[in-house]
Image (cartoon, rainbow, N blue to C red):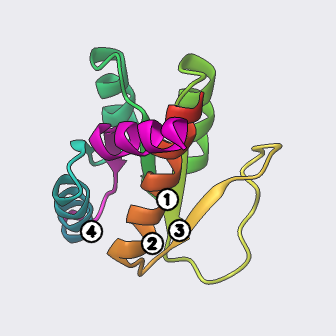
Amino acid sequence: MQQSSTMQEQVTSARLTVLVVEDEAAILELAEEVIAKLGHKVLCARNGDEALAMLRREAAVDVLFTDIRMPGMDGWELGRTANLAYPGIKVIYTTGFCGSLPSGDQGHAVTLLRKPWRASDLANLLQRILENQCRA
């Protein structure tokens, strides 16, 4: 039991650094607000190139929360590039596209949060990432 409560304390006190990448300003602001209210550090980028520049500057980004359909570099390419350069980063993809999505050549299961997403769904995903980090 002691070990379980210690892990719970770690999860409760731990915080993530989340890089949100979204080309729609209102959605970017909403995501920033939701994540900050959860107590996490939030970085924001409006496109893939800006996100990669931030990743190079910020050494400890835990989660990349990226839109899939953006002008220029799409979210699939951004996620692939981030995973190659920063193997420990977790990627959550989001989209409002209603059709079936291509795999983005990910070659593995991806975490997808459909728009319009609920704050509670995003909070649950981030909580699971925290719990997995505390177990590692």
Please, what is the three-letter code of the amino acid marked with disc 4? Ile
| Residue tagged 1 | 125
Numbered disc 1: secondary structure: helix
Q: Residues within 10 Å of mark 4 (few under 14, many from 20)?
A: some
The quadrant in which the C terminus is found is top right
Q: Disc 2 on helix, strand or loop?
A: helix
The residue at which mark 3 appears reads as 113
Q: Is residue 126 magenta?
A: no
Rate crowding at label 1 as few (under 14), some (14 to 19) or many (20 or more) other CA atoms within 10 Å.
some
Query: Hey, what amino acid is under mark 2?
Result: Asp
Query: Which mark lies nearer to you, 3 or 2?
Result: 2
Say which element carries label 3. Answer: strand
Asked whether the beta carbons under mark 3 and mark 1 sit within 8 Å of each other, the answer is yes
Q: Is residue 111 left or right of residue 55?
A: right
Decide which of 85, 132 is in the foreground and name it. Answer: 132
Residue 27 in picture, x, y percent from top left: 27, 68
Between the C-alphas of marks 3 and 1, the distance is 9 Å
Q: Where is residue 91 drawn, in percent x and y?
A: 54, 44
Q: Earlier in the sequence, mark 3 or mark 1?
A: 3
